[in-house]
Amino acid sequence: MEREKACLICLRGNELLLGECNIGDRFSVRLRIRCPEGSIPIGVWHTHPGGDSIPSSQDIKEARRVGLKFVCVEGSQGLKCFKV
């Protein structure tokens, strides 16, 4: 059974960087808001194993709660990104 994966997307100047990454269970993944030094968190990439490439209401709620600007979801329809 595939598990959910997630990585924080961070910005330093014009450069996109990966921040904290983690692997969860089939339905969720915990992710700390940690970026490389001198960068800020702007979004999150994560998978929906065997599921939709559309963020869940929980995905959007959590992204907004921590001040992220977008959520990218990789699922059965490929990778899709959404402003939150």
Image (cartoon, rainbow, N blue to C red):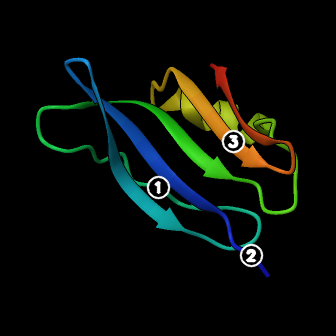
In the picture, the quarter occupied by the C terminus is top right
Which circle's residue, 2 or 1, is located before the other in the chain? Answer: 2
Residue topped by disc 3: 73
Reply above or below: 29 against 10.
below
Which residue is at the front of the view, 5 or 27? 5
Proximity of marks 2 and 1: CB atoms separated by less than 8 Å? no
- Could you give the CA–CA distance between mark 1 and mark 3, rounded to whole angstroms? 15 Å
How packed mark 3 is, by other alpha carbons closer than 10 Å (few <14, some 14-19, many 20 or more), is many
Could you say which disc has been placed on residue 31 in the image? 1
Residue extending furthest bottom? 1
Which circle's residue, 3 or 2, is located before the other in the chain? Answer: 2
Give the x, y percent position of residue 79: 70, 39
Proximity of marks 3 and 2: CB atoms separated by less than 8 Å? no
Q: Residue at x 41, y 38 (%)?
A: 9
- Could you give the CA–CA distance between mark 2 and mark 1, rounded to whole angstroms? 18 Å
Residue topped by disc 2: 2
Which tag is nearer the camera, tag 1 or tag 3? 3
Query: Helix or strand or loop: what does disc 1 sit on?
Result: loop
Q: Amino acid at mark 2?
A: Glu
Q: Residue at x 59, y 37 (%)?
A: 62
Image position of 65 (left or right of 50): left
In the picture, the quarter occupied by the N terminus is bottom right
Q: Amino acid at mark 1?
A: Leu
Which circle's residue, 1 or 3, is located before the other in the chain? Answer: 1
Image position of 13 (left or right of 29): left
Residue extending furthest left? 38
Q: Amino acid at mark 3?
A: Val
